[in-house]
Structures are given as structure tokens and as C-alpha cells.
Amino acid sequence: MPQISVSPLASPNEANHRLIRLAAQASVAVASLLILAKLAAWLITDSVSLLSALIDSMLDVGASLVNLIAIRHALTPADDEHRFGHGKAEALAGLGQAAFVAGSAAFLLVQAGERLLRPRPLDHPDIGIAVMVFSIAVTVALVVFQKYVMRRTSSVAISADSLHYETDILANAGVIVSLVLVSRFGWQAADPLVAIAIVAYIFWSAWGIGARALHILMDRELPDADRVKIAAVARSHPAVRGVHDLKTRSSGSHVFIQLHLELDGEMKLNDVHIVSEDVMKRIMAAYPNAEVIVHEDPEGVVEQRSVHG
């Protein structure tokens, strides 16, 4: 029986693409602003925990620029050499971000260790606290916008970007705690200890970003809940007797779905085509960014390697 495919990549969702680009540009702008603010605060206070936040923001700019370039490439429509589109560029950007984040953590660990061994008082901690409060407010606004974009587009690159900005919020809060402990209670060890705690959290975040990007590059199946949903949508058509050999993967904000429909072997070819088209439309209604490929089999003729959602 013939295979039928419908590809939304030929007519991309421009509104979603604009949102993804805007989110990437916003992250670069925010990180650049925070670098200037944190640099000034670090020069005034000489706080190693504030230095950790500064280095993190500097790497944020690098990671976000990589993101921006990768997103522009990922949103390029499919061509003759890349029939499945360029969405995996987002996953490559995610791996790049993981490397940036891990590198920043290693540098900060060295700085925090040196300050722990040779503690010294901080200058003008109140200025540092004010700058970190400002940083948290700006970063929260960015993360809220990124979450909105993620819900609309399922962009992996924006998701990775949002994750490390979420860690920045906690890191900035930790810097405030350390500055308060040093300035109000004289506990100078709090500054490097908070920096070390931030380093541990940064390493954990880098692992999460890298693992998700690797899953996409390795064509990992969608979660079981999605597979069950896809199979249920396909079976919802009254002419479908069964579904097997369901295969799924994601690439950037796009999802690729392949499945076999079991139909009445006596159906006319034209009727088979109509049923398949309707099933694909139902699946794409549930997954707007999906490319769906359907193969039709007579009922009872099921390959040995059968996967039921």
C-alpha cells in the first residue's frame, strides 16, 4: 500500500519562528546588560561570589549568541540536502551551552577555593546587594517570556537557554545571601562557600542541558505519554482497525511521526487514501509542528517488529 506524508516544514509557522528569534535576541540583550552591572559591582566589592555571577553572565552572552546563530540556521526551511530540515542545529547549540556552563563552573571553583583559603573583607557590600536584586528582577522577566515562547514553540534551544537563566536566579539569590552574611555577621567564609554551592548547581544544570541535547541528536523517542496519545488519535478514526510500528523523534521544534494503520483489506485505494489523510490531519491537530508519515496495511498483516502505543 502507498505511503503518504504531510510536511508542515514546507509552510513554517512564521509567528512561532519570530517568537523564537525574539527570545534568543532578548537573552543576548539581558546578559549583556547584566555583565555591565555585575562588572561594576564586582570592581567595587571584590566579592568572589559576585565574580561567579559575573563570569556566569559573560558565558551567558556567549551561549546565547551561539543559540541565536543556531536558531537562525534551525529555522531555515528544509532543502534538497536537508530533507528533514535543520532543527538539530538547536540541539548542537544545547551541547555548546552545556560546555560553556561547565567551563564557567570549573573556573569559579578555582576562584572560590583560593578565596576560601585566603579570606578577605568585602568593600561596599550594599552596592553588590542592590545590583543582584536588579539582576534577579531582569532575569525573572526574561525567564517568564522564555517560558511563554517554550509553550508556544517547544524550542529546545530556548528551553536550554531558559534553564541556565533559571539557575542564574538562584545563583544571584545566593550571592545576596553571602553578601548579607559577610556584611552583617562578619562571616567571610560565606562568600566562597556560596560560590562553591553555585558551582555545584551550575554543573548539575550543564548535565541536564547536555543530556537533553544528546537525546535529540540520537533520535530518542518521544515520551511514552505522547506515543500513547498519538496511537489513540490514530485509532479514533472509525475505519482504523489498529496501529503498529509507531516511530517518533524530535528535531528542534519539529516532531517526526511514522506509523502503520491497519485497515480493511477490501477497501478501495481511494478510500484508504481518504482515511490516511484524515488520520494525519487529526495527529497534526494535536501536534502542529509534526511531519507525519503513514503506511497502510491490510488488517491482520502486521510485521513482527510491532510497537503498540
Image (tube, rainbow, N blue to C red):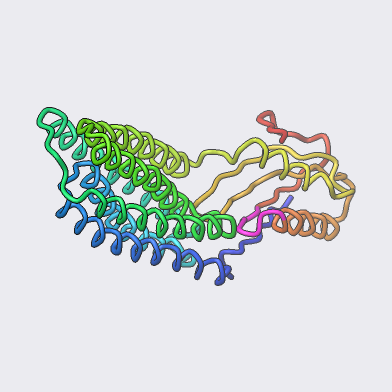
Residue at 28% over, 36% down: 181
Q: Nearer the viewer, residue 138 or 205?
A: 138
Q: Nearer the viewer, residue 148 or 176?
A: 176
Up-down: is 17 above or below 280? below
Up-down: is 209 above or below 9? above
Q: Position of residue 220 (x, y in %)?
A: 52, 38
Is 252 on the left-hand or right-hand side of 304?
A: left
289 is within the stretch colored magenta? yes
Residue at 56% over, 45% down: 249
280 is within the stretch colored magenta? no
Q: Quadrant of residue 137?
A: bottom left
Q: Position of residue 246 (x, y in %)?
A: 67, 40
- Number of numbered discs visible in the structure rendering: 0
Is 227 on the left-hand or right-hand side of 97?
A: right
Q: Nearer the viewer, residue 301 or 6?
A: 6
Q: Quadrant of the C terminus?
A: top right
Is 27 on the left-hand or right-hand side of 240?
A: left
Residue at 54% over, 48% down: 250
Q: Quadrant of residue 104?
A: top left
Q: Position of residue 33 (x, y in %)?
A: 30, 64
Provide the residue span drawn in magenta.
286-292
> In the orientation shown, which residue stands out farthest toward the left?
118
Is 124 on the left-hand or right-hand side of 175?
A: left
Up-down: is 44 above or below 304? below
Q: Position of residue 95 (x, y in %)?
A: 35, 45
